[in-house]
Amino acid sequence: MLAASLLCSSSYSETIYGQSRVSAYNWAMQNVLPQQAGLTIQNVIYKYSTEKNTEDTMLVHVQNEDAINGGYIFRHTDDWTGLPSNTIKKIVPASPLPIEYWGPGSIVVEGEGTVTDPSLVYTYKYDPCFDAQTDPSCPDYMPEYNLDDILPTVEDPLQAQYIQEELERQIALKEEEEYERKQRIKNNKVNIEKLLGGINMQAMSDHAFMQESAYFAINLFPASYYNPLEGNEYEDVLQLIDAELPDNKEGRRVNYTQQKLHNEMIQSQYDN
């Protein structure tokens, strides 16, 4: 049967000291100690009686399991081997680990004999403001708040008038640039067509000019110009007397100059 009692007192700043009592062979710490953040156990005080034969071997373990790492966070063993039945009371300092490490507790007998009237007290302390949010009176307590209430309202800049005007101006500029681009393409197309048309007209004009020139050349001279002349064959009567002709020095210089210029032109082709 489990019987637990709680005694608390406040002293030394805001630290709270207390104790919880249990009378059982097995117990859960959630039913014994307040599950207060920052609570630590200072001492384990236990009392029980034994019934055994003096010569029998008997070990009694008072213990708590380690809920985090496994094994035991607290274990104290009394050796009753060779001792008669009796009652024992002890105070044992405990590990200062937080309450979440303290797993199920028990009193276990190893050997011959029994334990009667078990009673165990845990003394503890804790700071009620260990977690400041548990109590508005704690110095570091921060009231709950709604982010929507404390954050400034952010307006959508796209809805601002000057932004709208700037966007409209940018759109107008883009439309104007697009219109000018299309006009340039259209003008270039017209100019190309005109250029191609001018080339064709020039070719047609040249052809017409050649035709007119040929017609003019045909009609420039009288028809008699194109008719062969009728007449007899006249034989040459010129007779040259053999004589020695002197060398033409001027003609020789001209011939030499032309030959030199011809050679230089040919050589320039190889030099390049």
Image: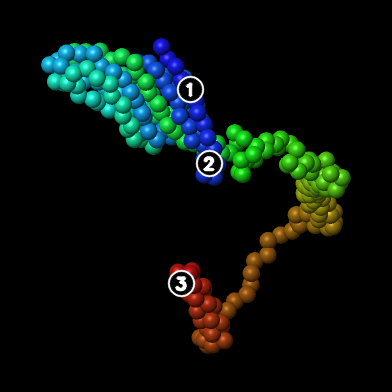
Reply above or below: 125 against 254.
Answer: above
Q: Is residue 148 above or below residue 56?
A: below
Q: Amino acid at mark 2?
A: Ser
Q: Which mark is residue 5?
A: 1
Left/right of residue 233 with respect to residue 226 in the rendered view = left
Identify the disc placed on residue 157. none
Q: Amino acid at mark 3?
A: Asp
Question: Mark 3 near mark 2, Cβ–Cβ under 8 Å?
Answer: no
| Along the line of sight, the residue nearer the viewer: 45 or 168 | 45
Q: Is residue 72 left or right of residue 177?
A: left
Q: Nearer the viewer, residue 86 or 19?
A: 86
Secondary structure of the residue carrying numbered label 2: loop
Residue at the image point whose x is 53% and y is 77% from the top? 261
Taking the spot 45% from the left edge, 69% from the top edge, the residue there is 270
Q: Quadrant of residue 116?
A: top left
What's the residue at 85%, 48% (across, down)? 162
**Residue behind mark 3:** 271
Which of disc 2 and disc 1 is earlier in sequence? 1
Q: Amino acid at mark 1?
A: Ser
| Mark nearer the N terminus (1 vs 3) | 1
Q: Quadrant of the N terminus?
A: top left
Distance from Cα at disc 3 to Cα at disc 2: 116 Å
Where residue 233 sits: x, y (%)?
Answer: 68, 61
Numbered mark located on residue 11 in the image: 2
Q: Is residue 270 left or right of residue 72?
A: right
